Image: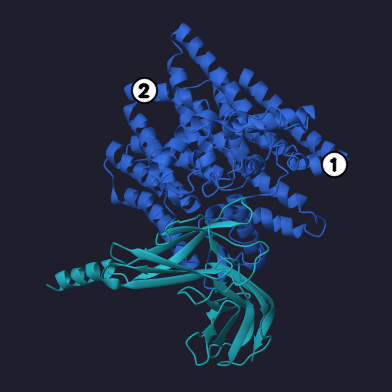
Chain colours: A cyan, B blue
Amino acid sequence: MRAALLLTVILVGGCTRAPSAYITQRRLDGPKPPQIMLRCRTTGLEAPVKFAWRFAAPVKQVGWNVPVDETAILVTVPEPPQLPLWAECTATGAGNVEARASRALVAPVVAAAPVAARSGELVSVRGSGFGPSRNADDGVWLVPGWGRARPLDHACKGASWSDALVSACVPPSSGGKWQVRVQAGGELAIWPTPMAVP
Amino acid sequence: MRAALFVLTWAMFMLLAPAAPLVGVSRTVATTARALVENGTLDVAGRGDAVSLPSTVVHDGRRRAETALGAALLLVPAEAMARAFAGVDPQLRLARALESGTAAAVVAFLCVLFFGALREEGLTPRAALEFTLLLAFATPLVWYARVPDGSALAALLLFVAVRAARAFAAADGKGATPTLGLALGLSLGALVIVQPTLLLAALVIVAWCGLHRHAPIRPASLVRVIGPLVAGIACVLLHRWHVGAAAEPMGDLVQGLDGLLLSTGKSIFLYAPICLLALPALAWMWRARRADAQLVLAVAAALLLAAAQLDDWHGDPTWGPRRALPLMPLAVETVALAWLARRSERRARRRATSAVALLAVAGIGVQLVGIAIAPSTYLDVATEVRLASGSPSWFGEQPSECHFIPQFSPIVGHAWLLSHLVRNDRRLDVDPPYKLLLASAPKLESVWPRLRVDWIGRDWSRAAAAAWLAALGAIAVAAALVLRRRVLR
């Protein structure tokens, strides 16, 4: 009986995934201005899934009278890039269950990060290409030369995320020298000057 | 004799070492090895991005390779040595030579094992040597003996595993059985670490052993085979969990199979023409040595299916079917055994020898144009032609689609570029292989300055290049003389 219950829990738990989405991008090699094929990948949504896309102003869809509710969409971005450049996809499955994802269409770059901070302090990292909102894997990381990296706390009071500015709190008892890295949309931006936490 | 063969093949591979910087997976492998040596971590952040370091993933604030662990570990000694000499080698020429030297040593070792295997099967030293040189220089192995991306290592380990499996299955349960079982298990475990997509092939080999072993399988033997394999799988899973790797993106299986078998851009039969003879050789083997034929067929099917279903079935930028490379030793061995079986019929043997010689010459020709020019050069040409065609999005999202367009075949394209290079003829718009596809061929003026022979000594001073050639040439000639004396004895 217990085994049957356990098996049921494993099977049901294993097959029911929280709805989530993420965007993949593939830059087409060659066209000027640059073209990017975006795909909204979802998990945990029941068919039929409908997609809605939103873009930053400089991002334009390629073609005329092209469907805008499909999983893949071809867009063009200006060259040189006019920031911000991001895309957001909202996938709606059966029962109006929604999953949303966003990502910047340029690689993230850190322009400024603090050189010192205390544990628990709210710090800000400036730059570009962080994306309009924070996805599940996005975050600011404190990376040591050797050992485990530690994420900043993005749930603390005052924490925020935007394409050009991320604010989050230094985790407690994280003394030492750390390299500040911003992970956004599966890409990494590094601030070369280490941050000291007493 | 085997030492002389190792030295000969290694020296010849080193003579052909490339100058072009590593690209694709080989760059990821070398960068990971360098990170391990310099920082003691797998983190390659700051050394490249997703484009320059393919098969890497960003997780927990670090960028790490997803699959290149085994190949990177093999390169660690070379990178450590390169780091030790970094002060006297600021241009990293020694580092490049050491990286190529590692790949060359792997393929040279494979050649020695292959030669030994053919001798065990009853081939004369001369025939075994000829088939070994055919494997080394008439298949894309020669290209992968210059580039340390782990493909040659996977080919070596798969060949060792297949040989060990045959010996293990034939063993009587006493004597050398424990060693054979352990050799089989270790080669399978290492194979999975070096190339995780070969897991299916590894499992097929274990299943074949279970079906064909004459003596009963004892628990101890089973542990010796399964233990290292399970350890290898655990190592891969742990590594993938550690780096946060997702499942490899899947593509279209039929496209992958078409690409690896029939396409003009990646077919194993075009890049290694000797594989054409593997088909009739397998038919002979099916009649004469059915169990061995089943093993080769099952391993080939497992490898091709696992590779073909990947989005990255082509493994670009590279020369030929990188993911099917481990099949080359098995295919050439099958051909050699079928050739040996015809020794009693004079006419049949003469026909078979002629066919092998003809395909060997064709294979050497294909590899010659492959190693002469860096593969990324021609892929860049294909991109420029696409952009000049007026429809820049044509196979823009899937650059691999150009492998299905005969006029863009890299073999033809490399031969065309090489002919211009040899004649010093800059007019690339006069006779391009893709002329049929375009109303007017682009001039490709930006390609000419980048078009150079991909040889390590090209950027060196004349004296250094001559010394390199002379030293390696002398080693190769000395080894060849030793081999000749032994073979003719």
Q: Quadrant of residue A35?
A: bottom right
- Residue at 34 percent across and 48 percent down: it is B221
Local SS, label 2: helix
Q: Chain of mark 1?
A: B
Residue B90, placed above or below residue B259: below
- Residue at 83 percent across and 56 percent down: it is B88
Nearest the eye: B67 or B83: B67
The percent coordinates of residue B251 (x first, y second) are: 42, 48
The percent coordinates of residue B177 (x first, y second) are: 37, 42
Q: Which residue is label 2 attached to? A: B283
Local SS, label 1: helix
Nearest the eye: A23 or B488: A23
| Type of amino acid under label 2 | Ala
- Residue at 46 percent across and 30 percent down: it is B331
Quadrant housing the N terminus of chain B: top right
Nearest the eye: A67 or B141: A67
